[in-house]
Amino acid sequence: MLLIIMVLWFVGADLAFAAAAEPIESAATNWEGVTVHLMKVTRKRNVLTVKWAAVNEGEKKQSICFGFTGKNVCYTVDEENGTKYYVLTDKEGNPMASANEWVDSNTNGYSRELKAGSTARLWMKLPAPSAEITEISIFLNETEPFEDIPITDK
């Protein structure tokens, strides 16, 4: 009996975790077999945090790259006010985003080989739009825009 209860508890915990990990929206990318899942968009005071997962559902490894500063970078747009927001940087000019490095002479970002069947979890922090703005559009490299995404306030 105890074993059955434990199994049910673990199954329930797995189901709860799976439900909590459902993407807001998903999109194919220009990297063969790679899908981007937008996971979370939250505003805390004046900072917006965007989290996503790049999943290689293909059968071979793919090189992926998300730019954070420089040229060809990820950003958000408050379409109601026509304002474009770029990734925040610290005092040294380093992006406030997933582990990043110079990926070419003009761009700092995340560039890795993603093995078949693996997932890269990424995040970036940007200036938040004003509190009355409840949706944002998100532009990530090599992916169609995620438009009118609800912002969750913390």
Image: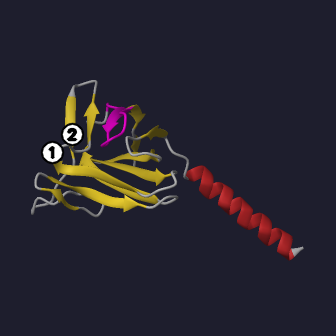
Between circles 2 and 1, the one closer to the viewer is 1
Secondary structure found at label 2: strand
**Which label number is shown at residue 49?**
none
Q: Which residues are magenta?
A: 132-146
List the residue tagged with mark 1: 71
- Which quarter of the picture shows residue 61? bottom left
Residue drawn at x 45%, y 38% as measured from the top left: 27
Of all residues, the one furthest to the right in this rendering is 1
Question: The N terminus is located in which quarter?
Answer: bottom right
Residue drawn at x 35%, y 33% as measured from the top left: 145
List the residue tagged with mark 2: 85
Front-most of 117 and 99? 117
Front-most of 70 and 136? 70
Q: Is 135 covered by the magenta stretch?
A: yes
- Which quarter of the picture shows residue 80? top left
Front-most of 67 and 86? 67
Give the mark nearest the N terminus, 2 or 1. 1
Horizontal relation, residue 148 to residue 48: left or right: right
Residue 70 in view, yes or no? yes
- Amino acid type at mark 1: Lys
